[in-house]
Image (cartoon, rainbow, N blue to C red):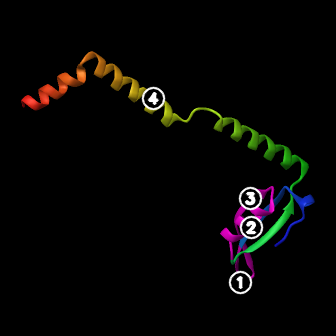
């Protein structure tokens, strides 16, 4: 399905068709043809419907995207944990604690 540039952002909805019923599966707001293609490939074989994103939804979607992008600008938690472990290792090595533990382990 090809979409025109002036249609973006647009909401895509995937439905599973069972007899006469359409069961909702997923919805995604897309901003480009590439995102739309990815959604349609993910839900291939299902009924795909589109609907225009209303101005109220655009504001809510835009604010959610801005909040998500701000959250990503911080330092990831695993980097902080790794830095603390490295600092502890350096301190333990400089005070000789690691050497003492290794000597005790070798003597037993």
**Residue 43 is one of the magenta-drawn residues:** yes
Task: Say which mark, if any, is on residue 83.
Answer: 4
Query: Going from the N terminus, do you reach mark 4 or mark 3 first?
Result: 3
Q: Secondary structure at mark 1?
A: loop
Distance between the alpha carbons at the discs numbered 4 and 2? 40 Å
Residue underneath mark 1: 19
Return the residue found at the far front.
Answer: 94
Residue underneath mark 3: 28
Query: Going from the N terminus, do you reach mark 4 or mark 2 first?
Result: 2
In the rendered view, tell whether residue 42 sits above or below residue 89.
below
* Circle 2 residues within 10 Å: few <14, some 14–19, many ≥20: some
Q: Quadrant of residue 41?
A: bottom right
Q: Residue at x 34, y 19 (%)?
A: 91
Estimate the x, y position of residue 51 in percent, counting from the top left.
86, 63
Say which of 77 and 88 sits in front: 88
* Circle 3 residues within 10 Å: few <14, some 14–19, many ≥20: some
Say which of 93 and 54 sits in front: 93
Mark 2 vs mark 3, foreground winner is 2
Q: Residue at x 78, y 57 (%)?
A: 30
Query: Going from the N terminus, do you reach mark 2 or mark 3 first?
Result: 3
Q: Relative to 107, is 73 on the left or the right?
A: right
Residue underneath mark 2: 37
CB atoms of marks 1 and 3 within 8 Å:
no
Q: Which residues are magenta?
A: 16-44
Distance between the alpha carbons at the discs numbered 1 and 4? 57 Å
Q: Relative to 21, is 80 on the left or the right?
A: left
Q: Quadrant of residue 4?
A: bottom right
Q: Quadrant of residue 69?
A: top right
Estimate the x, y position of residue 98 in percent, counting from the top left.
24, 25
Distance between the alpha carbons at the discs numbered 4 and 3? 37 Å
Query: Going from the N terminus, do you reach mark 1 or mark 4 first?
Result: 1
């Amino acid at each position: 399905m090809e979409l025109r540039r002036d249609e973006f952002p647009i909401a895509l909805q995937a439905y599973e068709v069972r007899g006469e019923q359409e069961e909702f599966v997923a919805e995604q707001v897309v901003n480009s043809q590439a995102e739309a293609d990815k959604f349609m490939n993910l839900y291939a074989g299902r009924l795909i419907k589109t609907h225009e994103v209303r101005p109220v939804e655009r504001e809510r979607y835009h604010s959610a995207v801005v909040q998500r992008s701000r959250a990503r600008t911080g330092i990831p938690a695993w980097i902080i944990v790794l830095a603390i472990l490295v600092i502890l290792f350096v301190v333990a090595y400089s005070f000789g604690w690691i050497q003492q533990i290794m000597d005790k382990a070798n003597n037993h």
